[in-house]
Amino acid sequence: MLDAGIVPDELIAQRDAFISIDEAIRAYLTSHSLVTSEIALLGRLMDRWKKEPLTLVNYQWAESWIRSMKRVDNMAPSTIRHYVGALARCFDWVVTSGSTLLPVNPLRLLPKRYATYNAEDGAVVKTQNKLVKVDVCRDRRLSVDEESAVRRILAGHKPEGRQRALTLHYAPAIAFLFELAIESAMRMREMYTLTLDQVDTGRRTIFLDKTKNGSKRQVPMTSIAIGAFESYVARVQSGDLAMQGFTFASGMVFPWWHGSKNTEPDAIRDLNLRNVTLQLSRQYARIFDAAACVNLTFHDLRHEATSRLFEKTSLSDLQIAKITGHTDPRVLMRYANLRGSELARMLW
C-alpha cells in the first residue's frame, strides 16, 4: 500500500517523523552531531533517494545499490565502504527508534568483502573501458637521506640541478608543519587548524577536540616536536619577514586557516578547508619533488610517524591508536610486521 502511495490508517496514528529514505537521513542529520565527512556522504545519498519509501529498503535493495556503485559509479572499495558505513549508522538509528517501516537494517547483513569487485563486476566495468578499482594500501616510508634532503630544501638550499631555491610562502610554518607531521602522526587538517590553546608544552600534549572520526584525543609531543614548536613561535613573535606579517593575534598556530565564523554555512567552511588542504598538498609535492623524494605525499608522513611509534617505543597497539586516532584496529595490523622485525633483533 505504501508503494502505491496509500498510508494505512494504523500507520497514520503511529506515523514516524519520516517515511522516505531522504526524510530518515534528514532526521538523523538533525538529531546527531556528525563529523563533516559523514555529513557530506549522507547529503549526497539524501539527494539520490528523494521520496523513495523506506519500505523499499531490504537486502536486495542493498545489494543493488552496491552493484550500482561498482558497475555504474566505478567507486573504489574504500569509498563504497564509507558510503555504506554512513548509511548503516543512520539505519541503525531508524531501527532502534522503533520505526515500523524499517524493522531490520539490511546493510548489517552484508557479507565480508562486499565492496570488493568480483569477476562479474569486473567484466561489466571492462565493457565500459574503465578500470576495476582496488584498495590502494600505501606503505611509502621516508628514508634518512630523503628526510635530510627535505630539510635542506625547507632551509632554503638550492635543489640539485636547478638554478635557484624554491620560493616558500610562510617558510617557517611549512618547515614546522613537516616536523610536526613526522613526530605526531597527526592528519594535515588536524595540524593546520590548531589554535595556541590546544598546545600545552608543559604537559607535552596537543589536545584535539574535533577530529576526522569525531572523537577527541590528546597527542603527546616528543622533545623534537616541542623544540620545533618553540623555535617556530620565537620566529613568529620576532616578526620574521618570512612569515609575511603573520602573528598569533587570531589564536591560530598556522597562517593558512583563520577559523570558521559561527554564521558561516558548513558547506562554505568545508570548501575553504578543502582548498587549504589542496594548496598545502601541492606545496609539499613541489618540496618533495625538489628533494628527489619520488612518489612521496604529505599523508605518507602520517604513515611514517605511526611506523616510528611501533619501531621506537614499547607502546601497545591500543596506546598507539589513541595517539594516531585510528579507530579500526585492522588498520594498525599493517604495522605489526615492524614490531616483529624489532623483536627478531632481540633473539639469539
Image: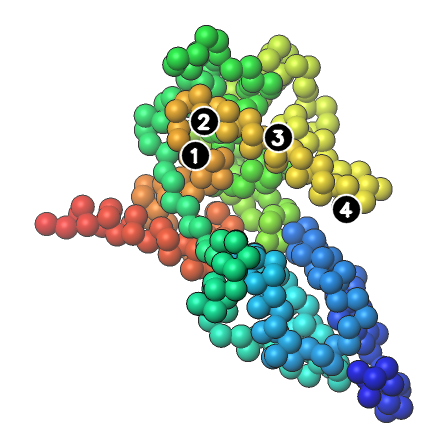
Residue 33 vertical placement versus 177 (above, below): below
On the image, the x and y values in percent for residue 250 come to 73, 27
Q: For the residues carrying marks 2 and 4, which lies nearer the camera in this image?
A: 2
Residue 154 vertical placement versus 86 (above, below): above
Describe the colour scheme in one phrase. Answer: rainbow
Q: Residues within 10 Å of mark 2 (few under 14, many from 20)?
A: many
Instruction: Please give the name of the residue rendered at 38% of the width and 14% of the height, measured from the top-left corner.
Output: 160
First in sequence: mark 4 or mark 1?
4
* Structural distance between the alpha carbons of marks 3 and 4: 20 Å
- Which kind of residue does numbered mark 4 sit on? Asp
Q: Which residue is mark 2?
A: 288
Q: Which residue is mark 4?
A: 266
Which is more toward the observer, 4 or 317?
A: 4
Task: Confirm or deny contact between disc 3 and disc 4 (CB under 8 A).
Answer: no
Q: Which residue is mark 3?
A: 279
Q: Which residue is mark 1?
A: 296
